[in-house]
Image (spheres, grey):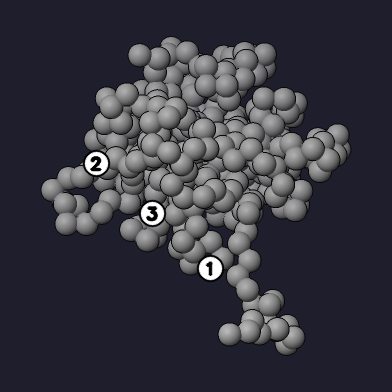
Amino acid sequence: MATPIITDGSLDRVRKTPRVVLPVRSDLFADRAARFASVAAGNAMSGYLQLMAKVASAQQSVLASRMAGAVPEAALTASHGYGMPPLSAQSHERAPQWRADLADIVRHVRAQSTNGVQAALATLDVLDEAAQESLADRVLAGTSLDDEAALVPFVGAALQVYFTRLAATLDVALVEHCDIPHICPVCASRPVASVLRIGGEQANLRYLVCSLCATEWNVSRIQCTSCDTDKGVKYLVLQTEDDAKSEPAARAETCDECKSYLKIFYQEKDPHLDPTADDLATLALDLLVDEQGYARSGPNLLFHPGSS
């Protein structure tokens, strides 16, 4: 049969897959706060998840309280010319704005927290600017110390607000050609998890979700998100009696080539999931996979996993 030649413009109706989705939703952190509150019920980490609901609520308030600064022209030029992430977290010169975000998040959380949390917030109060910047560097590099564990979620939350605010101002066309699949095309951070989306242009596609700026980028399914191989990729799940009759929304995608893993969430199983919140709510899955000898490839900036 001959291939028909389409002349009526119907090619415009062909589905266009978004390569990169920037964090332009104004209610991103509000939805995350609601999700934290939802998954806290009956969870072994209920207290921590409830605290993170307060942190995410504070992030939402702080996000809209300031305008994003200008992205340096040199970074935009390098991104356009060489496919480099324009806001690389390791080299971007952070504006003092992020510290103001941190102060506001601390103020919001302090107003509704218990004595145990107040102690961590008091520690943040006495850090000078240089100490705050050094701690931020360690959080972004994944080298924060165990005795800083209580501070990490607040610093991580402030950095998320700062970088998300900047990322939302970019032209998506600028970052669509960054070609290192396992890092964020905007800030070069590792993903917190991947999500198999439902609905709209993203339906049935797998997107990695940045742990820092919440940008999403499309990566093929059944492919290691650390070393890019499609060999030795398998999935581990943690099932309880309650979900024995159905597949859980969270799986650990493991790779036998590089011995790493990252969680993948299936939105069709739970349309309301949030990768950052659901990642912390499924910490038991991390423990299971760790026992199998796999190392996690991406961080959750609202949690310090410890060095042991």
Q: Secondary structure at mark 1?
A: helix
Q: Residue 238, labelled with which disc?
A: 2
Label 3 neighbour load within 10 Å: few <14, some 14-19, many 20+: many
* Rendered residue at 19%/52% (across/down): 243
For badge 3, the amino acid type reads: Tyr
Residue shown at 56% from the left, 37% from the top: 182
Mark 2 touches mark 3? (CB < 8 Å): no
- Mark found first going from the N terminus, 2 or 1: 1
Q: Quadrant of residue 233?
A: top left
Q: Which residue is mark 1?
A: 200
Q: Vertically, is 216 above or below 298?
A: below
Q: Is residue 40 above or below residue 153?
A: below
The residue under the point 53% across, 44% down is: 209
- In the rendered image, which quarter is residue 66 located in? top right
Q: In the rendered image, which quarter contains the N terminus?
A: bottom right
> Which mark identifies residue 266?
3
